Image (tube, helix red, strand yellow):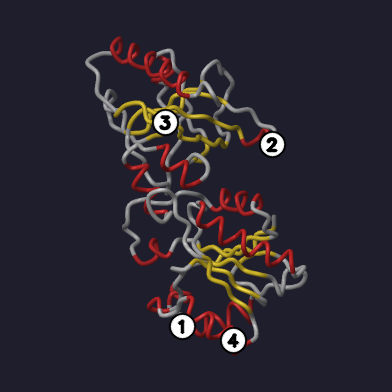
């Protein structure tokens, strides 16, 4: 899939495409409905389908000190957009210039002139332009006057409420992996490079792959049943089952936040490799133990519990 720079003019053959426009951070079921509709329009009219996303997220621009909240990286979004049928991902760098662009200029100068949009599909709550002055009504009004088409996709509900990234974040922060997975249509997954650590897991008999959480939202600290995939293995990569600690490791000094998956029956060298770690179930909160024997016994019990939880995967 092609990745386009939002600072650059889109040229043929991707010009005159249908653009799905939004943040699409989690690419949850609601986001998938928006992109799916854009892809169907594009296929019906023999046009390219392009998904536009913002990076950094506007919240990060306006509130640089905000706690980490991302649900996906750009690379993850690109893979998800491709799987949904899009031809390209358009990355709009959210900077001071974009933040100061009026809603009208966003439509005329960016969507139409720079990107050559033939159509734009958004969610019902999408807003844009300086001061969030533009919305789906603004888009529809300009579409009638300027000759492009636009469509608003209604929110997607589940059994409880409208599906949103906020609900997913709330679920993860309480350790509710099942709700997050249902809304995302897949497990919440952290992608990172395995780094060298202090080898505590190896000394305990449970070697771990240490991963920095970066800009990802922090789910509830504790022990999780997880699966892993090694990205260097390509499309047919293995699924590794394991148990992971997410937190500050209170039994060790000094505290250090890490995601530390231990994969069962796996002894290969992962240092420097990029891997995906998917969160399937919360097992217990993080805890401090009086000694290493107690910690080792608890880790063993956690691994047994994780294997039971992952039995059907």
Label 4 vs label 3, nearer the camera: 4
Q: CA distance from mark 3 to mark 2?
A: 26 Å
Residue, disc 3: 281
Q: Secondary structure at mark 1?
A: loop
Q: CA distance from mark 1 to mark 4?
A: 19 Å
Tell me if label 2 and label 4 are in contact, CB under 8 Å. Answer: no
Depicted 123 relative to depicted 238: above or below: below
Tag shown at residue 144 = 4
How many C-alpha atoms fall within 10 Å of the one at disc 1: few (<14), some, or many (≥20)? some
Q: Position of residue 55 (x, y in %)?
A: 50, 61
How many C-alpha atoms fall within 10 Å of the one at disc 2: few (<14), some, or many (≥20)? few
Mark 1 or mark 4, earlier in chain? 1
Q: CA distance from mark 3 to mark 1?
A: 44 Å
Q: Secondary structure at mark 3?
A: strand
Residue, disc 1: 102
Q: Position of residue 248 (x, y in %)?
A: 31, 33
Say which residue appears at 51% left-offset and 18% top-offset. Answer: 264
Q: Position of residue 191 (x, y in %)?
A: 52, 41
Mark 3 or mark 1, earlier in chain? 1
Tell me if label 1 and label 4 are in contact, CB under 8 Å. Answer: no
How many C-alpha atoms fall within 10 Å of the one at disc 4: few (<14), some, or many (≥20)? few
Q: CA distance from mark 4 to mark 3?
A: 49 Å
Residue, disc 2: 234
Depicted 311 relative to depicted 184: above or below: above
Q: Secondary structure at mark 2?
A: loop
Which of 310/206 is in front?
A: 310
Q: CA distance from mark 2 to mark 1?
A: 43 Å
Tell me if label 3 and label 2 are in contact, CB under 8 Å. Answer: no
Q: Quadrant of the C terminus?
A: top right
Left or right of 92? Residue 280 is left
Label 3 vs label 2, nearer the camera: 3
């Amino acid at each position: 899939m092609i990745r386009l720079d939002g600072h650059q003019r889109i040229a043929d053959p991707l010009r005159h495409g249908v653009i799905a426009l939004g943040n699409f951070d989690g690419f949850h079921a609601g986001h998938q409905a928006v992109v799916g509709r854009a892809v169907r329009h594009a296929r019906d009219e023999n046009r390219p389908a392009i998904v536009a996303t913002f990076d950094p997220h506007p919240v990060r621009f306006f509130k640089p000190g905000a706690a980490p909240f991302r649900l996906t990286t750009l690379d993850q979004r690109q893979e998800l957009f491709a799987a949904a049928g899009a031809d390209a991902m358009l990355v709009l760098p959210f900077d001071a210039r974009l933040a100061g662009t009026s809603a009208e200029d966003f439509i005329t100068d960016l969507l139409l002139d720079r990107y050559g949009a033939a159509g734009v599909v958004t969610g019902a709550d999408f807003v844009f332009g300086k001061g969030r002055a533009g919305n789906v009504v603004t888009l529809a009004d300009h579409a009638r006057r300027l000759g492009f088409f636009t469509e608003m996709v209604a929110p997607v509900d589940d059994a409880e409420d409208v599906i949103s990234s906020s609900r997913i974040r709330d679920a993860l922060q309480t350790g509710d992996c099942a709700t997050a997975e249902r809304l995302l249509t897949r497990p919440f997954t952290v992608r990172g490079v395995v780094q060298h650590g202090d080898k505590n897991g190896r000394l305990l008999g449970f070697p771990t792959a240490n991963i920095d959480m970066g800009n990802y939202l922090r789910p509830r600290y504790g022990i999780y049943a997880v699966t892993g995939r090694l990205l260097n293995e390509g499309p047919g990569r293995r699924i590794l089952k394991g148990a992971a600690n997410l937190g500050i490791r209170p039994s060790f000094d000094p505290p250090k936040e890490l995601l530390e998956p231990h994969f069962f029956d796996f002894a290969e060298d992962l240092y420097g490799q990029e891997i995906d770690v998917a969160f399937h179930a919360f097992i217990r909160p993080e805890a401090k133990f009086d000694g290493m024997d107690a910690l080792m016994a608890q880790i063993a019990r956690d691994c047994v519990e994780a294997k039971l939880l992952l039995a059907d995967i």
